Image (cartoon, rainbow, N blue to C red):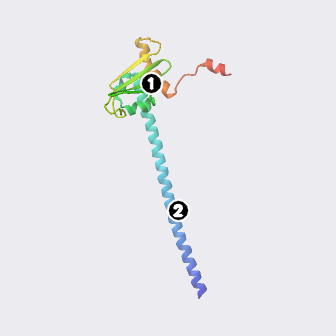
Amino acid sequence: MLRNNSLSVLIALFVGLSVFGAKELLKTDETGRAQAAAANIAAESGKIHNALQADILREISYNPNAVLRLKGRDIVEALKAPGLIRKDLPTVIWQYRSDQCVLDVFFKTSSGEVESARPAHYELRMRDGREDQESVAACMKNIARHKTGLRMVDLKSVYKAL
């Protein structure tokens, strides 16, 4: 009789642990599915973010005046962090440089926070002093290409490396 009771207790304990284990396994599976769904959403969000960044770069490359419609955070998303930040409140200047030209973006703000502010003005200039319209128009494309790392490889540098 004692043996039957012990066996019944063991069976009950085994069944209870099995049910609990199966429940935890299902919970873990649901957590895994939720994590996978979150990862998919993050990946899609990254794709959307990259697409928006590419759209901003394309727009300002072909129409530099589009910079005036962006907010500070959009400019940082597209062109990365400026090479120089100068704060002479209420004016804040962000400077982007490439080998050929310089872009200065001017913000007017009393607090110095420009992430949500729109630029008041911008200036593009060539480093060699040229002021022809064609060179200045190409400057923004040059800045955008410089910041994204999309540059043509100079074959002379490849030959020198060999």
**Where in the figure is residue 150, as x and y percent of width and height?**
52, 26
Q: With respect to residue 49, does 21 lie above or below?
A: below
- Depth check, front residue: 60 or 122: 122
Classify mark 1: helix, strand or loop.
Answer: strand
* Label 1, residues with CA under 10 Å away: few <14, some 14-19, many ≥20: many
**Where in the figure is residue 130, as x and y percent of width and height?**
44, 11
Classify mark 2: helix, strand or loop.
Answer: helix
Question: Which residue is pictured at 44% across the width and 14% down the height?
Answer: 135
Q: Quarter of the image containing the N terminus? A: bottom right
Residue 12: image quadrant is bottom right
Q: With respect to residue 142, does 3 lie above or below?
A: below
Disc 2 residue type (three-letter): Leu
Cα separation between marks 2 and 1: 54 Å
- Depth check, front residue: 99 or 158: 99
Question: Which residue is pictured at 44% across the width and 24% down the height?
Answer: 96
Asked whether the beta carbons under mark 2 and mark 1 sit within 8 Å of each other, the answer is no
Q: Which mark is residue 96?
A: 1
Disc 1 residue type (three-letter): Tyr
**Where in the figure is residue 157, as x and y percent of width and height?**
62, 20
Q: Which mark is residue 25?
A: 2
Q: With respect to residue 123, does 19 lie above or below?
A: below
